[in-house]
Image (cartoon, rainbow, N blue to C red):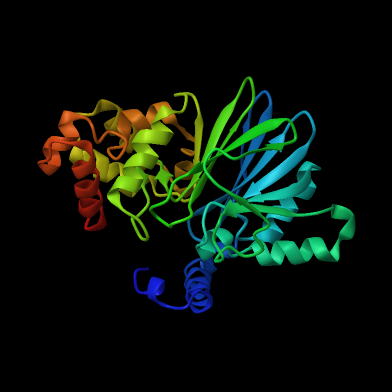
Amino acid sequence: MSLLNLLPHRLSQRLTALYFTVASFSLQRRQQSVQTTAMASMTVKKIPALKDNFMYLVVCNATRRAAVVDPVEPDRVLEVVKEEGVQLNQVLTTHHHWDHAGGNEALYQRFRENADWGELRVYGGDDARIDRLSHRVKQDDTFEIGQLRVRCLSTPCHTTSHICYYVESDQDRAVFTGDTLFLAGCGRFFEGTPQQMHDALIGQLSSLPDDTHVYCGHEYALQNLRFCNMVEPSNEDTRALLERTQAADLEGRRALVPSTIGQEKRINVFMRAREPTVQAFVGKTNSLDTMQALRAAKDKF
């Protein structure tokens, strides 16, 4: 990926698209199950894509208006939209990488071919590498999905313009974290610094309510939990979840998402960089140096 960053954007996107197409070919032969989280005010449809990506259809229950997060396989998204009978008009792009934003253009063209669907609004960070971006957002910008409130969290590091989307109502809370926060892990520091990831995880995401559902961009649970267990072998929460993950097939591991902010603060060593047990593993005495050392260790794990 670091070599791709040196190439012109269009060329790197084409190469990345080719990689994911080949890697996910066998999985595309069978349709993978959509899993649903039904809450009082919102419903989230988790739609597997490519090899290990997640797309999310976020539905306001009161208005049946919907947004989709990172629709890399737009035809599959539209199938689910039709099945659910909702009105889709918003795309929430977390970052520019092809396996997240690579479906924006095709989805936009489908809307152009079907004028009765209305306007497609594409949200994302201020980044020319995001296809069909129409609504540039920054920290604390807000908008609505029906009656659901959305607040944008700027979380640069994995990419310079990465955005997480915090969606809430009076009853429910969810955050869509792309490649910043995973279940028991975090994204690689491709375009940013340890300070930026520290600010994202420790400063912003850790401050969300503990019952906030966490919807991440990939299914990486097993490898992430093995790393967390190595760092904190005495963490009972981590060990219990790792045992559950090791016993699951692929669909069962997918079912572990969503996590919650509270759970991540108990098991995710990147969100636990202030804990003495985590600092001791990397031989550091402050959370920023610990964050940097943890990522370096995970990159070699």
Q: Which residue is drawn at 58% across and 63% down?
A: 130
Quarter-of-image position of residue 76: bottom right
Mark yes or no: residue 247 visible.
Answer: no
Residue 98 in the figure: left or right of residue 265: right
Q: Quadrant of the N terminus?
A: bottom left
Q: Where is residue 117 in the image (x, y as percent from the top left)?
A: 85, 53
Residue 92 in the figure: left or right of residue 241: right
Depth check: give the residue in front, 34 or 159. Answer: 159
Q: Which residue is drawn at 71% across and 49% down?
A: 90
Depth check: give the residue in front, 121 or 175. Answer: 121
51 to 149, vertically: above or below: below
Q: Where is residue 32 in the image (x, y as percent from the top left)?
A: 59, 53
Q: Where is residue 200 in the image (x, y as percent from the top left)?
A: 39, 41
Mark yes or no: residue 194 visible.
Answer: yes
262 to 177, vertically: above or below: above
65 to 262, vertically: above or below: below
Q: Which residue is drawn at 76% across and 67% down?
A: 109
Q: Where is residue 291 in the image (x, y as percent from the top left)?
A: 24, 44
Q: Which residue lies furthest to the right in this view?
A: 116
Depth check: give the residue in front, 290 or 23. Answer: 290
